[in-house]
Image: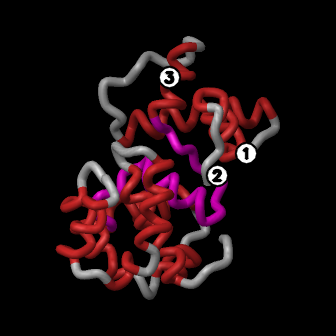
Amino acid sequence: MGAGSSSEIFKELCFCLLTANFSAERCIEIQRAIGDGFLTLPEALLAERLRELGHRFPRARARYIVEARRFRDSLREVLESFGNSRELRDWLVREVRGVGYKEASHFLRNVGRTDVAIIDRHILNLLVEYGLIERPRALTRRRYLEIEGLLREVAEMAGLSLGELDLYLWYLETGKVLK
C-alpha cells in the first residue's frame, strides 16, 4: 500500500466518495480546496463548502464523509489487515455508506492496489463498442464482478495488471490520466 497516514488515506476515501455520479476532475479541485476540512468540518459547513465548490450532491456527500470519519484514525490499519483486495473492497462497500464497487475500487487503486478494476461508464462504453458485453441496465455486484473477471482475462492475455489495463482503457476513452 502507498505511504500515508490514516488521515491522508481518509482524505483519499473522501475524494472517491465525491466521485460517484460526478466528474473526477472537479473532485480533484474540490479535494484540493477542502483539504483537511474533510477531517474536521461540521457536516453543515462541509455541505456548504461542497455546494460553493459546485458539487452536485453536497448534503448527501457531506453526510457520507462525516459518517465515514469513524474510520479516519484507523483506516491505514484496516487496509493493512486485508491481504485480499476483493475482500477489502467488499468490506468498504459494506461499511462505508455511499461507497459502491466502482468507488471502492477507485479508492483501492489510489492507495496502491492494482488487482481490482474501476468499471465506470467509460470502461463500459469501450467494452460495449468492441462487442465484449451488452450494456448492463444496472451494475449490480454480480454484474460488476463478471465484467471485472472479463477484464482480468484480457489483462492476463496482455501481460498487464488489472489496474494497468483499465487505466489504459480509460485513457483510450477519455484521453486523460488524472490520478
**Above/below status of 174 relative to 2:** above
Disc on the earlier residue, 3 or 2 = 2
> Mark 3 or mark 2: which is in front?
3
Residue 6, position as x, y percentages in the image: 51, 83
- Residue at figure coordinates x 71%, y 35% from the top left: 155
Give the quadrant of residue 129. top right
Disc on the earlier residue, 1 or 3 = 3
Q: Point out the stretch of residues depicted in magenta.
A: 96-120
Residue at disc 3, secondary structure: helix
In which quadrant is the C terminus drawn?
bottom right
Type of amino acid at the residue the image marks with label 1: Ser
In which quadrant is the N terminus drawn?
bottom right
**Furthest-bottom residue in view?**
73
Residue 141, position as x, y percentages in the image: 37, 42
Frontmost residue, 34 versus 63: 34
Do the numbered discs 1 and 2 sit on residues whose CB atoms are within 8 Å? yes
| Magenta highlight on residue 12 | no
Report if residue 172 is visible in the image.
yes
Q: Which residue is mark 3?
A: 125
